[in-house]
Image (cartoon, coloured by chain):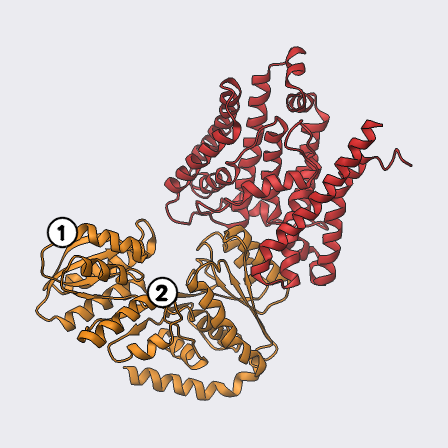
């Protein structure tokens, strides 16, 4: 029994449990949400957030932090609504170039031993500036295929849920089940031993950043598919949401301890928390505070579990 | 012309009073993206004051206001999707972005919900738009000066925040009107960023390089008081400075008017425009044929109604007007 309910297990169960509790509360407050369309409306905007959260998770996995995710996703959204729609080839080239820049960022941060927070904060202004250059005033059009994808209505299960599960599974396979993922987590856990085992840390870090860039690009494309057009500040709040999502989902800032499934659940929980407060009819003045309170509640639970875990290990 | 509008509105009001009951079971929601300045606070208060009695009288079943916490388009899109789930019949929205909400707004329209955007309008064609005629604001300023100073003269222009569309629009209106009034010449232009302190610094900076005979200052609102302070500090005679309905501007005007009979003109839009959007939404729900593009009436303060308008202006805020059903009908009649 003790083996089954080990702290580690509970630690992974907390995010799922908080999402379930919130979901039940939302269904109770607003029975209309308990339908195909309802679930889609509740969760479709969580899909790009989930992708951005996975991107942030990949960076956190190698002990870094990306403060430019929000502006980067905004930039990708602007490219998607302009170049990717009018000149798909140029659009794809730009986005591929962006992933290259992310890999380069990883290399520079590693070689020069720079704090990732500083580099990515700087890059956030670069992305923001480029976004304004591409789209000086809000506008653009989503490419038809993106719009089709994001408004598709698969049978039985709504798009938002299918996409979330897909993101979680793909993330899980890459990070938890592939040898590549083991090396990346190893970089976060104990860089030196990974290097001693003969792996190139520079390459690993570059790969982690490139992969994060890829997920962030997907986030931007999905976002435009939902909104139909873009503006230069469309996703700036994703930076903090993504960090909160990773932590809510059971990830840690250091040590390569992350969970892709947890990260997706974290992103869904954050989105749902907003809807929950809105259905509760909490006055806007209190909403920021209430959102914070939910975060603190879940994190407090995490802290308690961490303590228990340490106690277990000490035994 | 004006008489015709009033008569038209009256006729509309008479014919539609019987139709009130049709919206008694309808629920309207306000989706607001930001509440962090006095204009938005006044906007929300006006919404409460007007919709409260409307709900009590049974004109509509509910009129709930929602504000997003972070002033972000993606957050507001989620908020609108929640409103669809909550089953509102109409959503009145002041949008964080003219385009980024289009997906959510389309979802609402597809669900059969009436969407009316105002102030921060959206481009999604299925929504109604109650837009501010900023160009008209600029034009009115020059027209007032032309009336007051038929012999013309030199003007100073205070612009807003560079790169923002509102600044371009007001400036375009001023330019268009200047082309028709060649007796005026703009001899200097500064950016006041719609803030009194910035405007004061900017005007103080440019004044020494300007000729003594400036007769008027065209502004964009929120900058008139600062400009006046700069002129006074430089020991220059006070030109006609157009004001923007801010409380400090009107108070200053009143002071000068009492002391020396100072005359000017002030124009802006009222935060109570949210109530106009409310009534427009109610009218659409009521089955009234409403054009998709409507224009927010400008609130003008003149020498005659200064005292009265000052009373409607809360300290540190902007002159407010709350609109009635009849006002909304007049605006609709004006556009169709």
**Labels 1, 2: one chain:** yes
Q: Which residue is disc 2 drawn over?
A: B132
Dot 1 and dot 2 residues touching (CB under 8 Å): no
Side of B102 relative to A188 (left or right): left
Residue under label 1, please give it.
Answer: B208
Q: Which mark is residue B61?
A: none
Which lettered chain is shown in red? A
Q: Residue at x 56, y 63 (%)?
A: B66
* Residue A284 placement (x, y as % from top left): 56, 60
Say which residue appears at 75% left-offset and 36% top-offset.
A306
Left or right: residue B229 compared with residue A162:
left
Pick the quarter of the image with the N terminus of chain B.
Answer: bottom left
**Mark found first going from the N terminus, 1 or 2:** 2
Q: CA distance from mark 1 to mark 2?
A: 35 Å
Q: Which chain is orange?
A: B
Quadrant of the image occupied by residue A48? top right
Residue sitting at 53 percent across and 41 percent down? A221
């Amino acid at each position: 029994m003790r083996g089954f309910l080990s702290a580690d297990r509970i630690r992974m169960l907390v995010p799922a449990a908080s999402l379930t509790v919130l979901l039940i509360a939302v269904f109770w407050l607003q029975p209309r949400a308990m339908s195909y369309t309802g679930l889609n409306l509740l969760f479709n905007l969580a899909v790009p957030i989930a992708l951005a959260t996975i991107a942030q998770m990949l960076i956190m996995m190698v002990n870094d932090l990306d403060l430019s995710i929000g502006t980067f996703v905004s930039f990708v959204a602007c490219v998607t609504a302009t170049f990717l729609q009018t000149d798909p080839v140029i659009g794809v080239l730009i986005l591929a170039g962006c992933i290259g820049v992310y890999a380069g960022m990883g290399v520079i941060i590693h070689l020069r031993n720079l704090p990732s927070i500083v580099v990515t904060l700087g890059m956030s202004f670069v992305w923001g500036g480029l976004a304004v250059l591409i789209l000086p005033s809000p506008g653009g059009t989503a490419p038809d295929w993106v719009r089709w994808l994001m408004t598709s209505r698969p049978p039985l299960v709504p798009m938002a849920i299918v996409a979330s599960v897909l993101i979680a599974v793909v993330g899980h396979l890459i990070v938890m089940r592939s040898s590549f993922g083991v090396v990346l987590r190893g970089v976060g856990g104990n860089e030196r031993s990974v290097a001693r085992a003969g792996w190139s840390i520079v390459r690993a870090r570059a790969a982690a950043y490139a992969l994060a860039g890829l997920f962030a690009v997907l986030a931007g494309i999905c976002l435009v598919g939902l909104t139909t057009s873009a503006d230069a500040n469309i996703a700036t709040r994703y930076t903090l949401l993504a960090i909160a999502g990773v932590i809510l989902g059971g990830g840690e800032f250091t040590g390569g301890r992350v969970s892709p499934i947890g990260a997706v659940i974290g992103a869904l929980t954050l989105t749902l928390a907003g809807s929950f407060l809105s259905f509760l009819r909490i006055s806007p003045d209190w909403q920021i505070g209430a959102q914070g309170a939910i975060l603190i509640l879940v994190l407090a639970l995490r802290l308690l579990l961490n303590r228990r875990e340490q106690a277990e290990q000490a035994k | 012309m004006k008489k015709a509008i009033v008569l038209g509105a009256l006729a509309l009001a008479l014919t539609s009073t019987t139709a009130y009951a049709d919206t008694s079971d309808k629920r309207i929601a306000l989706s607001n993206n930001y509440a962090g300045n006095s204009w938005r606070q006044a906007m929300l208060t006006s919404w409460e004051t007007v919709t409260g009695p409307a709900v009590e009288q049974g004109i509509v079943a509910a009129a709930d206001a929602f504000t997003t916490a972070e002033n972000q388009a993606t957050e507001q899109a989620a908020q609108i999707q929640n409103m669809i789930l909550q089953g509102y019949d109409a959503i009145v929205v002041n949008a964080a972005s003219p385009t980024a909400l289009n997906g959510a707004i389309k979802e609402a329209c597809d669900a059969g919900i009436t969407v009316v955007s105002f102030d921060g309008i959206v481009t999604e064609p299925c929504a109604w738009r109650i837009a501010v005629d900023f160009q008209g604001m600029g034009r009115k300023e020059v027209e007032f000066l032309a009336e007051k100073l038929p012999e013309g003269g030199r003007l100073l222009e205070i612009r807003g925040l560079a790169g923002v569309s509102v600044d371009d629009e007001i400036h375009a209106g001023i330019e268009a009107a200047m082309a028709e009034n060649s007796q005026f010449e703009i001899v200097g232009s500064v950016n006041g960023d719609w803030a009194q302190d910035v405007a004061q610094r900017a005007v103080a900076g440019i004044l020494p390089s300007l000729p003594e005979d400036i007769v008027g200052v065209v502004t964009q609102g929120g900058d008139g008081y600062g400009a006046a302070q700069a002129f006074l500090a430089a020991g220059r005679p006070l030109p006609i400075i157009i004001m923007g309905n801010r409380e400090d501007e009107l108070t200053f005007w009143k002071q000068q008017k009492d002391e020396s009979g100072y005359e000017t003109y002030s124009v802006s839009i009222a935060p109570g425009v949210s109530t106009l959007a409310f009534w427009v939404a109610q009218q659409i729900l009521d089955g009234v044929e409403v054009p998709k593009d409507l224009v927010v009436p400008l609130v003008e303060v003149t020498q005659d109604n200064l005292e009265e308008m000052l009373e409607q202006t809360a300290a540190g805020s902007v002159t407010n007007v709350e609109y009635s059903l009849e006002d909304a009908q007049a605006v609709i009649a004006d556009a169709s």
